[in-house]
Amino acid sequence: MPTDDIMRFLALWMLIHESADEGLKAAVRRGEEAAPEGMAGGPEAFVDGLAAMVAEEKERLKAELASGAVRREDAGTQRAALEELRFEVASLRGRIDELAGMLETALAKMGASAGRG
């Protein structure tokens, strides 16, 4: 695979992740700005509210970890949860890689079709 193809693939992968990150940050902001009853405003409002609640919990967890408040007896449970999370993230990465491959294939086919027309 030529270096240009690898660079293009990595740029596409980075763009997908960046877009997802920005979308999540925007959902958190909208969810924080909406009143709690805003989650009843349809699927988008629910996702925004849920994203804001998860972000709030993440901040609590960060503070808890930074303060050393995590008890040793919770460590095993947290370790198992972390392993499960790692598995899920790896699964998501695999799916994103599949999507990136499909996009590359579609772009290549479109380029080939355009070259014939």
Image: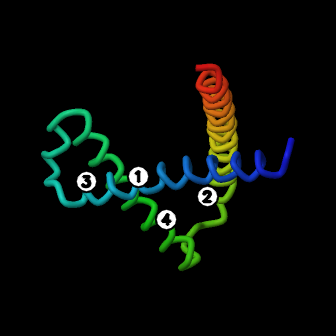
Mark 4 vs 2, N-terminal side: 4
Q: CA distance from mark 2 to mark 3?
A: 30 Å
Indicate the amino acid at tag 3. Gly
Q: Residue at horizontal 62%, vertical 21%?
A: 113
Q: Give me the residue at 85% from left, 46% from top.
A: 2
Question: Given the image, on which type of amino acid does mark 4 rest?
Answer: Leu
Q: Quadrant of the C terminus?
A: top right
* Residue 106 screen position, x and y as percent: 61, 26
Judging by the rendered image, the residue that carries numbered circle 2 is 74
Mark 2, secondary structure of its residue: helix
State the residue position of label 4. Answer: 61
Please give the count of numbered marks on the rendered protein: 4
Q: CA distance from mark 4 to mark 3?
A: 19 Å
Name which of mark 2 and mark 3 comes first in the sequence: 3
At label 1, counting other C-alpha atoms closer than 10 Å, the crowd grade (few under 14, some 14-19, many 20 or more) is some
Q: Which mark is residue 24?
A: 1
Query: Which quadrant of the figure contains the N terminus?
Result: top right
Q: Which label's residue is closer to the chain start, 1 or 3? A: 1
Q: Earlier in the sequence, mark 4 or mark 3?
A: 3
